[in-house]
Image (cartoon, helix red, strand yellow):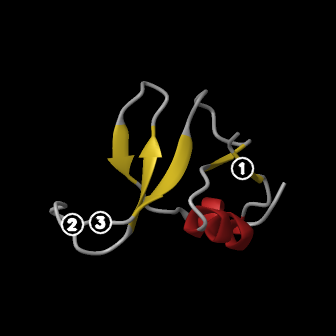
Amino acid sequence: MMSFSQALIALKTHQKVCRTGWNGKGMWLALQIPDAYSKMTLPYIYMKTADDNLVPWLASQTDILAEDWQIVT
């Protein structure tokens, strides 16, 4: 288990992370770095939802303070 700070470092090294406290199975976060063909111009974090959609993600207070982050293998 790790803190959000550690999870953020993992994201920056192109690893996927999740929280054990999330209810949905198979949910994870990843960091997207835009390229020349992207509509976005800055990096952003996105989530794979339990129903297999990809959506932009914004951390909640609970997520930021949680200590149950882990790397998705």
Residue in the image at 62% along x and 60% along y: 63
| Mark 1 or mark 3: whose residue is earlier in sequence | 3
Picture coordinates of residue 61, whole percent (x, y): 59, 67
Asked if the residues shown at circle 1 and circle 3 are in contact, with their CB atoms under 8 angstroms apart, the answer is no
Q: With respect to residue 29, does 62 lie above or below?
A: below
Q: Does dot 1 land on a helix, a strand or a loop?
A: strand
Q: Quadrant of residue 24?
A: top right
Q: Which residue position holds label 3? A: 34
Q: Does residue 62 appear to the left or right of 40 in the view shown? A: right
Asked if the residues shown at circle 3 and circle 2 are in contact, with their CB atoms under 8 angstroms apart, the answer is yes
| Mark 3 or mark 2: whose residue is earlier in sequence | 3
Q: Does dot 2 land on a helix, a strand or a loop?
A: loop
Amino acid carrying label 1: it is Ile
Picture coordinates of residue 45, whole percent (x, y): 44, 60
Cα separation between marks 2 and 1: 25 Å
Is 29 in front, or is 32? 32
Mark linked to residue 40: 2
Q: Which residue position holds label 1? A: 71
Residue in the image at 45% along x and 35% along y: 49
Q: Does residue 59 appear to the left or right of 46 in the view shown? A: right
